[in-house]
Image (tube, rainbow, N blue to C red):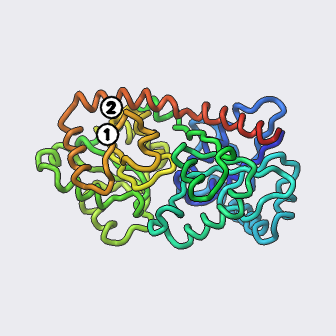
Amino acid sequence: MRITIDATSLLVRSAGVKNYTYYWLAHLRRQARPGEEIAGYPFEGRPEGPDAKLNHEASPLSAWSTALRLGLVYGVNRLGPSALDTALGRTDVFHASNLVRHAPRRAKLTATIHDLTAFLMPELHTPATVRADRFFAERILKRAEGLIAVSENTRQDAIRMLGIAPERITTIHSGVAEAYFDAVPVRRAKRYVLYVGSIEPRKNLPALLDAWGSLRPDLRDAFELVTAGPMGWADQSIRDRIRAETAYLGYVPESELPGLTAGAAAFVYPSLYEGFGFPVAQAMAAGVPVITSNVSSLPEIAGEAALLVDPRSSGELAAALTRLLESESLRGELCRRGRARAQSYRWERCAAESLEFFRRIAG
């Protein structure tokens, strides 16, 4: 059985999908049985182990090699299914991403549904992203023989929003990199509360800034708010506030994130919608108490291991921050619960369940 995974996301600037593809592909290859080949499209690219480099801002290949492979993807997208069949060669199952524009004619088609934000909250995305996600849904998701959803919440959204039959979608939770489970905390001059993620409307940073600004002065003196992540498409006023009201670190390399996360006194993530929520799962694995939203997949992923709040209420978010920062015993309890909860989010488990999914699809 030959399974070809669309790894185009590794060649471009990407956050959660790139993280997923990088670790998932490596673990699929490690756990495949004899006679099972896990190939990559449009390149072999073999991310392996903790020493491999994941850079969300850049391709792992040279500029020339990256351009050649992206050119191949562009050409195949323009030429159609026959060109894709030629590029895939002898493939039993092709697992597509939203950078693919056609379904293959010979291989069985599968894909991962990461989230349905473009359908549920289109105003939080750029018009180009909304168009791309809708095209992907029509051309790939609705034609696929089987789909993976990264959470049950995402599965239910896909059933409801796209009209896909429930039996065609399998929920397989994503994983957390091993480095988070044994991360050595980074120490800063001041204790800190951490947010990690792109600076974009969906992440709901204005509510976090308003909540932080409303905390008692003694709490803001004792802790600083640290934000990390690339500037996305947030408007200029939010960019200015992030830089003025937080210790903004910008993009933090993947190799430094586990230590930064583990060193936090608390992790706060008031997103309006997540398909899975990697930062929350990573914080729990690192033994950091979490405050996150009570919407989308976040209650499913966090379970009883986090304080859940209405993300649109800065007052409720401020109350949770106050409660957590004032109580060392609560922080300790959430740390213990979080570590236990995160054991469910291992890439080995995700890959094993995914391989069973592919075997079923391949017949």
Contact between marks 2 and 1 (CB within 8 A): the answer is yes
Q: Is 296 positioned to the left or the right of 346 in the image?
A: left
- Residue 270, compared with residue 201, is above or below; it is above
Place of residue 76 in the rendered image (x, y in percent of width and height, measured from the top left): 79, 66
State the residue at coordinates (18%, 37%).
326
* Residue nearer the viewer, 40 or 251: 40
**Image-quadrant location for residue 58:** bottom right
Label 1 secondary element: strand
Q: Quadrant of the N terminus?
A: top right
The amino acid marked with disc number 1 is: Leu
State the residue at coordinates (31%, 57%).
312
- Residue 285, compared with residue 230, is above or below; it is above
Label 2 secondary element: helix
Which residue was labeled with disc 1? 307
The amino acid marked with disc number 2 is: Leu
Q: How many residues crowd mark 2 within 10 Å: few (<14), some (14–19), many (20+)?
A: many
Q: Is 312 positioned to the left or the right of 218 in the image?
A: right
In the rendered image, is residue 190 in sight? Answer: yes
State the residue at coordinates (78%, 30%).
33
> Which numbered tag is attached to residue 225?
none
> Which numbered tag is attached to residue 334?
2
Place of residue 166 in the rendered image (x, y in percent of width and height, measured from the top left): 64, 46
In the rendered image, is residue 44 in sight? Answer: no
Q: CA distance from mark 2 to mark 1?
A: 8 Å
Q: How many residues crowd mark 1 within 10 Å: few (<14), some (14–19), many (20+)?
A: many
State the residue at coordinates (32%, 31%).
334
Place of residue 62 in the rendered image (x, y in percent of width and height, measured from the top left): 66, 58
- Residue 213, compared with residue 147, is above or below; it is below
